[in-house]
Image: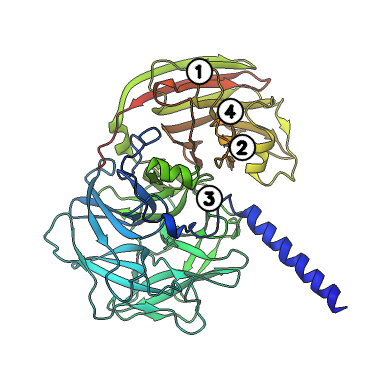
Amino acid sequence: MSQLRCIHSLIAVLFFTVILIISNNGVDAFHKVHPHLQSVSRISVSGKHRTGYHFQPPRNWINDPNGPMHYNGYYHLFYQYNPKGSVWGNIVWAHSVSKDLINWKALEPAIYPSKPFDKFGCWSGSATIIPGKGPVILYTGIVDANKTQVQCYAVPEDLSDPFLTKWIKPDEYNPIVVAGPGVNSTDFRDPTTAWFKDGHWKILVGSRRKHRGIAYLYRSRDFKKWIRAKHPIHTAAGTGMWECPDFYPVSMEGTMGLDTSVVGNHVKHVLKNSLDETRFEYYTLGTYFTNIDRYIPDNTSVDGWAGLRYDYGNFYASKSFFDPTMNRRILWGWANESDTKEDDIHKGWAGIQAIPRTLWLDPSGRQLVQWPIEELNSLRDKEVEISNLKLAKGDYVEVKGITAAQADVEVTFSFSSLNEAEAFDPSWVNAEDLCGKKGSNIQGGVGPFGILTLASNNLEEYTPVFFRIFKASNKHVVLLCSDARSSSLKSELYKPSFAGFVDVDLSTTKKLSLRSLIDHSVVESFGAGGKTNILSRVYPELAVADQAHLFVFNNGTVPIVMENLRSWCMKSAVIN
Ligand code: DQQ
């Protein structure tokens, strides 16, 4: 009997391990740790796949954007950085400043291990600007080799320095928060930007209890003494460790962003968490009940692994901030790698940041919408425009005259009828699986149609970004794919068939738009005006530099009209 129980437990353990491995997005939970490689630095850095206008430092490993903010005329981007090598490790807060969020000047690291409470690492966190006083950074300090985590604060040494180059960690009150009884001290990190309500500053800290994701709430009157609230602001079963929580209001009308402290009937709140177990993020929209300091997601928001994502591709540990100069909320995300650690060591760098995106609530109230910040347009150079091009079944048309490896493409497609749309099987709940089944070469009814980015001369390599429309019992289902499977001749890369469903009503308009920011090893796409977005990191062997091409295509039986395509060669940003 006991033997049987033993076998059952073994099977159960095996089953859950397999589920975890499968669901783990092809990467290990937490950052892959390779102690012997952490301080291996290359003398030369490979430029082959380096980006022209996506943020990346001259060399080495980067991950999460930290505490972005605008202060006294400058945008500040801090980010997790390994100064000694191109795998994760030796983490400091690197620091760059910018006037326009596109061109960046690097400064010395703002925060690095220097105190007993952060001797083993300075991990992610956020900035808060205290009215009349200036910015404060909250970050996670790693205290010991067991990775015990505490929350710490740092302030600028000299507020009159426009770059805020040096940051100090006052001994008084640091660390400001330690995991109390019942809190998992090795999964307790990434404090949010604080908001102010009823005489208190409030922050969230990500954590977990067993497999339940948790956002603990802390309150403070003076930003120094912090007390944990009786209840977390929110938790969700089965989601694992919540990294980099982000919590902020969005206006129920219009596209303007709001300061993090705004509450009221005219706003909804967003809670985003980065899931350590899947390395994907999800967010919910809901109501923040300030009287009890609880957040309750709307019943239209799935609160779990299958929830809404900012981005259905390589996009993680994101963080938003309110930009008062243009009254907008801006989202930054880390675009993690798809190549191998051997490649990262060889090329001397790993990781980039996505293009900052403005974000607002869709009029439906069911989801957010994102769009690249308008400053990006300043890099647009030579333009090619094509209008009213009919794409019959099997047509592939090259868009000539642009630098296809470094471009910005905006295109609108229309279709006269949806009658021939393929039937949708309700069991197709996973968009990525569906895209894997119905790739760009599999003929459909309405679609697949879209663009082939980073395509080599004879189409040995290409990253297709395309729509496919299905007919369900009472509506049409739109799928957006960014399929990396054919992106490179190299086999050992992570090449998923990234995809997301697009919540659009095709009964009123028979059009779909797509924008793709192509940048050597990145294809960052925005479907239907930013409703469904997918960033793919790809490493073509042949489709590089001037050997890369761009096509539009249709592989559905219904002819598609490409109403308009505008494509720009993109200048490189100045990032040092
Ligand atoms: N990266 C940081 C952590 C965070 C994780 C460490 C997310 O603070 O939880 O580099 O990528």
Q: Which residue is mark 3?
A: 309
State if disc 4 and disc 2 touch (CB < 8 Å).
Answer: no
Q: Which residue is mark 2?
A: 479
The label nearer to you, 2 versus 1, is 1
- Measured in 3D between alpha carbons, the distance from the residue under mark 2 to the one under mark 3, in whole angstroms, is 14 Å
Q: Please, is residue 286 above or below residue 330 in the view?
A: below
Q: Given the current orientation, which residue lies at the most extreme right position? A: 1
How crowded pointer 3 is (Cα within 10 Å; few <14, some 14-19, many 20+) is rated as: many
- Measured in 3D between alpha carbons, the distance from the residue under mark 4 to the one under mark 1, in whole angstroms, is 33 Å
Identified by mark 1, the residue type is Asn
Cβ of disc 1 within 8 Å of ligand 1?
no
How crowded pointer 1 is (Cα within 10 Å; few <14, some 14-19, many 20+) is rated as: few
Quadrant hosting ligand 1: bottom left
Residue 457 is tagged as: 1
- Measured in 3D between alpha carbons, the distance from the residue under mark 3 to the one under mark 1, in whole angstroms, is 34 Å
The label nearer to you, 3 versus 1, is 1
Identified by mark 4, the residue type is Lys
The residue that appears at 39% across and 49% down in the rendered structure is 86
Identified by mark 2, the residue type is Leu
